[in-house]
């Protein structure tokens, strides 16, 4: 059961809601086409061959038998691959080095996928193995600072603050390696016409794919067209451009025919990025009244030997609470594994585990309510540079969520609430995620048939971008959103950017807003200059659009149909392209989204199985643009929090360097039976300093704090503090 | 997947004849075999589809019930007489897999379900005595949290017969506790195999899961007189509430008058290469009064001789706690088959 509450009306725009998602009908009828579903004439099928040693090199690949197998067109290996320009995070068969088990080392192109896969098995591959760096815990002592990035924060005098402390918490928390598993795996179809490359790609950033392929193949970006009208989930793994996308284009060139390359589920574990594990050392020092004096958060994660990538778990710690002293740091352990990458709330999702469990331990030790402890240390301005927040209503989140949850019924003493064999516990945590935005372009076009066309070079991951852009245009132009046509996912459209870091809504909506305003102005200029128009002679700035008409703001009796203006314009559509501008004062405030998340768990006293009975979250994310898509994002994040707390872990063998549970039967994510009541509300107070719509991103905050709230609830239920995720029955039993 | 021949058998004799060809395999619901073919773990030369010839009937004659090998797991679990007389079996089936898989999976196929050992299922691991006899056992030095604690063949990871795999089936655990009999047909005619002798321990031949010959076809499973219709419980402990294999499962049945136990059935899943039935534990309960102490004693007997691996020592205590819990619930008056 999912409760949605949105009582506060949007104060500025006459918000027009689409009753269902813009793309709902296309998706449920199968009309929505995903990258691998496009029909391309004469297409061949490719499969990637992966290394099965963790370190060393490919000594030889005997392809004699494989080449003769039925249906085989081409086999590309490090020994015959064309030269391309390679970024550091992918493997494009340019040399024989093996950095991890699962690394692409060859591509087979054949008439059908089964024939490609069969030929791949017939390759005789010889390796020259090297001792591999595996086993994170055994190598923690070798942790090093990142080559760049991941800088720590520092404030106050840690030693002096520590000396004053009445209570100290000093613990280590760990989170496992995770792999993204969107419903749609990675997929690319590539075809060449001369030096022009056409690509269908499952991606979170069509323009990033365009630029990356242009650089790799040394052609101008305009020669690369990337299409992705629908993405079947990304969660960060489709934010970058991985080996298979380049290899599909390389194979198409090599085999001289279009090539389709779809990754198998097991290929999602390694070659397309992982959320690195973390080992987080957290030290909290507080006064007896609960005032934080010192916060120290040092997080160490693995990084691939291919390149540094930091899971910046300690980054948000610097801004969450007001403590007089603070230090944060990130360290890396080099391993023979695939690249780390962004996964939903990279940094915040993992970092909130360490910090928010430590705060629960502090509250327990101080005998202070966990919500109260957070209020005592509430940061009224950004503690980093002292900047004001553009908008922060976290106090309201705590109180509203606590009220909806029934937090006052919690017994602070663990193990007191029992129902038969079930031990019941309550826990909570703070949620947070940064608010970012970037310039984004859009075209808005008034059509002769009365409809409005919106085109943006962004992509919809399933998050609702189509829906909110139809609404934004309709809001801006005061029209029915059902009359707006939206086109996305094509690099011939005005440049936008990648969909990641919860920046999409905050970036693309202002772009469409600006383009709509300018298109309306052009329309108004046509009308006021036209002697046949009832608006003739008025000031263009005095003209507004309302439900398909142009009208004067100063005299509502004067109006005419937009279609009439366009008809007199020779039925030529009126359009404008605009790029949203960043606010000029953006360095004078700090923007973040906030939330409070509460959990109720039932832990079986005999089997130690945990059931998350309820999750209640209230979020301050600025304007909630659309109920359906927005709350869906929050709920999805909370469900992933359940997964993180209880289920999810990529098990990487320390000898072979392979993920052993590389399928959805053994890589556990919550099933319906694991997810019960989720009550998500947005307080819906617009943040107009941040952008003209008052909307901050919403995609990632739901996962933050959720796992910690569950772990804290398990402590309240059982008196057992588990500091190593996921919390499985054996860990509870043996605690 | 490798190329293979497909043929649909029209009579058991024909199926058995076809199965004598090297590398031939019977195809039931395909829920396990087809996956393993895609992973290149199984590479049959011929698939003999037996879904048209295997009985999909459940017949009760006198005191016994015969389940056709072709009965789908969903149909079996929801069959009136099974729910009434053998609720333990129904409950075990419904705790396994997903509705979609249960709709496809057959009784005969479920008996032959192969292990979910990570190192067996990924051919990139060079050491698996079950997949490549004599190659060693990568699980012994790897992730063995889900592996066996009873009846495994020992030795180190390089030992040519070592195997710590478990049988993943829930149905099998209930059938072991119910003391079922497997009916098969082969080139030499029909024969029956007591359930306890159907699955094997790894011993020196971990590549063999069962005592069925390659050209023998399972035709049905016979259930004896129902003894545990009123008092039984299937308890499954796992890493999520549904669609996960058992860390430990317990099929517990009691035949009781008042508080006195006349006979007991006990089998464990997730702990051994075969469903682990403990006759010692069952006998210890015969004539006993249902009590936590009696159940604890049975639990200790059932886990006697357990040997953990690096990551699964928890299973010993977890199994004991689960046995006590399952018997305690079974001893209570007949309940509907809700999970604990």
Image (cartoon, coloured by chain):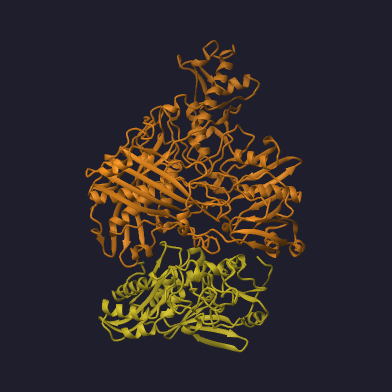
Residue B123 figure quarter: bottom right
- Relative image position of residue B258 (x, y in whole percent): 25, 81
Residue A106 seen in the current view? yes
Q: Residue furthest bottom?
A: B188
Which chain is rendered yellow in the image?
B
**Residue B260 appears at what percent x and percent y?**
26, 83
Is residue A36 shown to the viewer in this render?
Answer: no
For the residue pair A650 and A417, the one nearer the viewer reads as: A650
Q: Is residue A320 left or right of residue A516?
A: left
**Quarter holding residue A587:** top left
User: From what the image shows, is residue A588 above or below residue A41?
Assistant: above
**Quadrant housing residue A15:** top left
Give the residue displayed 46% in from the left and 41% down from the top: A151
User: Which x, y percent locates residue A326?
Assistant: 35, 41
Q: Where is the N terminus of chain B found, in terms of image quarters?
A: bottom right
Q: Is residue A335 above or below residue A348?
A: below
Q: Colour of chain A?
A: orange
């Amino acid at each position: 059961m999912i409760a949605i509450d949105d009582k506060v009306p949007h104060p500025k725009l006459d918000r027009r809601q689409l009753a269902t998602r813009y793309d709902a009908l296309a998706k449920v009828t199968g009309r929505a086409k995903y990258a691998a579903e496009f029909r391309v004439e004469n297409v061949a099928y490719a499969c990637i061959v992966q290394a099965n040693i963790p370190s060393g090199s490919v000594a030889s690949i005997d392809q004699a038998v494989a080449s003769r197998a039925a249906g085989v067109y081409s086999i590309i290996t490090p020994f015959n691959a064309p030269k391309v320009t390679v970024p550091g995070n992918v493997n494009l068969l340019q040399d024989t080095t093996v950095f991890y088990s699962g690394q692409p080392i060859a591509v087979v192109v054949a008439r059908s996928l089964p024939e490609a896969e069969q030929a791949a098995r017939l390759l005789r591959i010889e390796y020259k193995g090297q001792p591999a760096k595996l086993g994170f815990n055994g190598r923690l002592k070798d942790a090093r600072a990142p080559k760049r990035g991941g800088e720590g924060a520092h404030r106050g005098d840690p030693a002096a603050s520590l000396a004053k402390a009445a209570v100290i918490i000093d613990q280590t928390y760990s989170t496992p390696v995770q792999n993204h598993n969107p419903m749609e795996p990675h997929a690319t179809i590539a075809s060449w016409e001369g030096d022009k490359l056409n690509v269908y790609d499952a991606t979170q950033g069509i323009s990033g794919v365009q630029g990356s392929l242009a650089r790799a193949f040394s052609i101008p970006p305009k020669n690369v067209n990337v299409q992705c009208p629908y993405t079947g989930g990304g969660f960060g793994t489709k934010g970058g451009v991985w080996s298979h996308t380049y290899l599909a284009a390389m194979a198409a060139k090599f085999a001289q025919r279009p090539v389709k390359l779809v990754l198998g589920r097991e290929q999602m574990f390694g070659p397309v990025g992982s959320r690195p594990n973390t080992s987080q050392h957290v030290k909290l020092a507080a006064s007896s009244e609960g005032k934080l004096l010192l916060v120290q958060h040092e997080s160490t994660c693995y990084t691939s030997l291919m390149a540094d990538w930091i899971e910046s778990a300690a980054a948000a710690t610097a801004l969450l609470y007001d403590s007089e002293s603070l230090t944060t740091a990130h360290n890396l352990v080099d391993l023979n594994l695939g690249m780390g990458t962004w996964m939903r709330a990279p940094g915040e999702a993992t970092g909130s585990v360490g910090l928010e469990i430590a705060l629960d331990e502090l509250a327990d030790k101080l005998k202070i309510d966990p919500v109260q402890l957070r209020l005592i240390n509430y940061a009224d301005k950004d503690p980093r540079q002292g900047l004001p927040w553009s908008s922060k209503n976290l106090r309201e989140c705590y109180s509203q969520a606590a009220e909806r949850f029934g937090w006052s019924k919690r017994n602070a003493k663990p193990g007191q609430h029992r129902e038969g064999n079930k031990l019941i516990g309550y826990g909570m945590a703070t949620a947070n995620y940064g608010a970012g935005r970037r310039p984004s372009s859009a075209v808005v076009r008034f059509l002769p048939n009365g409809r409005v066309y919106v085109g943006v070079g962004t992509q919809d991951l399933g998050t609702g971008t189509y829906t909110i852009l139809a609404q934004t245009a309709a809001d801006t132009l005061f029209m029915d959103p059902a009359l707006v046509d939206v086109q996305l996912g094509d690099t011939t459209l005005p440049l936008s950017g990648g969909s990641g870091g919860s920046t999409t809504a905050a970036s693309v909506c202002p772009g469409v807003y600006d383009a709509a305003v300018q298109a309306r102005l052009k329309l108004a200029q046509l009308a006021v200059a036209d002697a046949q128009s009832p608006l003739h002679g008025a000031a263009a700035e005095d003209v507004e659009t309302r439900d398909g008409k142009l009208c004067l703001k100063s005299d509502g009796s004067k109006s005419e149909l937009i279609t009439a203006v366009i008809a007199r314009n020779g039925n030529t559509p009126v359009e404008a392209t605009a790029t949203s501008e960043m606010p000029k004062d953006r360095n004078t405030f700090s923007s973040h989204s906030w939330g409070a998340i509460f959990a109720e768990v039932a832990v079986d006293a005999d089997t130690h199985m945990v059931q998350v009975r309820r999750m209640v979250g209230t979020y301050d994310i600025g304007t909630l643009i659309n109920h359906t898509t927005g709350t869906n994002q929050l709920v999805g994040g909370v469900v992933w929090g359940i997964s993180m707390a209880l289920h999810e872990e990529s098990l990487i063998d320390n000898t072979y360097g392979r993920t052993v549970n590389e399928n959805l039967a053994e890589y556990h994510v919550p099933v319906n039976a694991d997810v019960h009541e989720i009550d998500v509300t947005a307080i819906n107070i617009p943040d107009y300093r941040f952008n003209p719509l008052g909307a901050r991103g919403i995609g990632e905050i739901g996962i933050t704090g959720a796992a910690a709230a569950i772990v804290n609830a398990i402590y309240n239920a059982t008196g057992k503090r588990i500091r190593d995720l996921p919390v499985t029955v054996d860990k509870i039993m043996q605690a | 997947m490798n190329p293979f021949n497909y043929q649909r058998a029209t009579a058991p004799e024909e199926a058995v004849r076809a199965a004598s060809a090297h590398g031939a395999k019977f195809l039931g619901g395909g829920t396990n075999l087809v996956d393993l073919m895609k992973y290149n773990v199984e590479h049959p030369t011929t698939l003999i589809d037996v879904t048209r010839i295997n009985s999909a009937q459940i017949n009760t004659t006198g005191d016994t019930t015969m389940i056709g090998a072709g009965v789908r797991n969903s149909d079996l679990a929801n069959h009136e007489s099974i729910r009434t007389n053998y609720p333990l079996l129904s409950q075990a089936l419904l705790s396994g897999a997903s509705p979609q898989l249960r709709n496809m999976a057959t009784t005969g196929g479920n008996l032959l379900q192969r292990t979910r050992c990570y190192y067996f299922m990924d051919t990139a691991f060079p050491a698996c005595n079950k997949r490549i006899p004599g190659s060693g056992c990568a699980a012994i030095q790897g992730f063995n949290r889900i592996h066996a604690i009873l009846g495994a063949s020992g030795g180190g990871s390089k030992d040519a017969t070592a195997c710590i795999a478990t049988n993943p089936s829930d149905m099998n655990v209930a059938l072991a506790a119910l003391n079922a009999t497997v009916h098969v047909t082969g080139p030499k005619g029909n024969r029956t195999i007591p359930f306890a002798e159907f699955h094997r321990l790894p011993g020196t031949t971990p590549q063999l899961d069962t005592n069925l010959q390659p050209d023998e076809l399972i035709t049905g499973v016979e259930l004896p007189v129902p003894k545990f219709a009123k008092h039984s419980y299937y308890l499954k402990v796992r890493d999520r509430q549904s669609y996960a294999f058992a860390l430990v499962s317990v099929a517990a049945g009691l035949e009781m008058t008042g508080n006195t136990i006349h006979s007991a059935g006990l089998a464990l899943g997730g702990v051994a290469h075969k469903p682990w039935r403990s006759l010692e534990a069952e006998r210890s309960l015969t004539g006993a009064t249902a009590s936590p102490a009696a159940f604890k004693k049975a639990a200790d007997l059932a886990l006697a001789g357990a040997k953990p691996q690096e990551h699964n020592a928890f299973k010993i205590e977890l199994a004991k706690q689960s046995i006590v819990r399952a018997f305690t619930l079974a001893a209570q008056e007949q309940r509907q088959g809700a999970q604990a």
